[in-house]
Image (cartoon, rainbow, N blue to C red):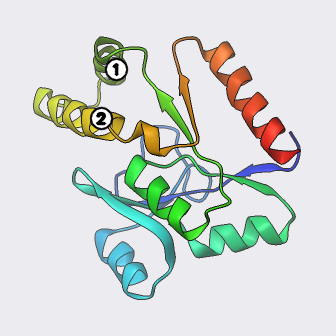
């Protein structure tokens, strides 16, 4: 889908191995992020765990001026804020097949302490309770099928 472009989010979390600034995320210090909050530079942002994540207004402008359909991959509270600002936006909630599957996925990353895993699961369960506020729910149990469903939704909505 050539006109579909993903925004690059900003975060205060450290870059993971292989991630590049300006490609995977804009990696900012907490001070830089909070300065941008004060400047009203974000269309949405949230503090998730110990780190901030957000979508810069400049990203939206950059991609829309290029004629793109914008894809944001953001957490639940940020998505709901974005939807309030842009009611015409289409929201898709990707659900894990089960809590156990989600736990396994988090553990497989190998980047969280047991306490962080439990905190992430607690947040995830809270987020799952908001799934009905989205336009669509897609269960991510098979990657190919999930991609096909999301592609179909985007294609149908663009028409």
In the rendered image, which quarter contains the C terminus? top right
Q: Residue at x 65, y 68 (%)?
A: 59
Nearest the viewer among 98 and 112 is 98
Graded by Cα atoms within 10 Å as few (under 14), some (14 to 19) or many (20 or more), the crowding at tag 2 reads: some
For the residues bearing labels 2 and 1, Cβ distance under 8 angstroms: yes
Q: Is 124 rendered above or below residue 138?
A: below
122 left or right of 127 in image? left
Element under label 1?
helix
Nearest the viewer among 56 and 80 is 80
Q: In the figure, residue 53 lies in which quadrant?
A: bottom left
Q: Is 107 rendered above or below residue 64?
A: above
Residue at mark 1? 102
Which mark, by number, is residue 73? none
Residue 69 at what x, y percent from top left? 78, 54
Residue 39 at what x, y percent from top left? 44, 88
Q: Residue at x 17, y 37 (%)?
A: 119
Q: Residue at x 35, y 61 (%)?
A: 46
Residue 131 at what x, y percent from top left? 43, 37
Residue 156 at what x, y percent from top left? 82, 37
Graded by Cα atoms within 10 Å as few (under 14), some (14 to 19) or many (20 or more), the crowding at tag 1 reads: some
In the rendered image, which quarter contains the N terminus? top right
Element under label 2?
helix
Nearest the viewer among 83 and 103 is 83
Residue at mark 2? 124
Q: In the figure, residue 151 lies in which quadrant?
A: top right
Q: Is 126 rendered above or below residue 88?
A: above
Find the distance from the CA under tag 2 to the CA under tag 1: 9 Å
**In the displayed image of the protein, which residue is found farthest to the left?**
115
Numbered label tally? 2
Q: Residue at x 51, y 31 (%)?
A: 94
């Amino acid at each position: 889908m050539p006109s579909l472009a993903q925004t690059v989010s900003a975060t205060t979390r450290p870059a993971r191995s292989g991630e590049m600034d300006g490609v995977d995320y804009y990696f900012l210090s907490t001070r830089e992020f909070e300065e941008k909050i004060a400047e009203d530079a974000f269309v949405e942002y949230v503090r998730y765990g110990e780190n901030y994540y957000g979508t810069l207004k400049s990203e939206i402008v950059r991609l829309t001026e290029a004629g793109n359909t914008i894809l944001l991959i953001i957490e639940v509270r940020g998505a709901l804020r974005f939807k309030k600002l842009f009611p015409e936006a289409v929201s898709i909630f990707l659900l894990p097949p089960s809590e156990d599957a989600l736990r396994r996925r988090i553990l497989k990353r190998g980047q969280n302490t047991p306490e962080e895993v439990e905190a992430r699961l607690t947040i995830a369960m809270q987020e799952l309770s908001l799934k009905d506020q989205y336009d669509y729910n897609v269960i991510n149990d098979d990657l190919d099928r999930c991609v096909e469903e999301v592609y179909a939704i985007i294609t149908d909505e663009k028409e």
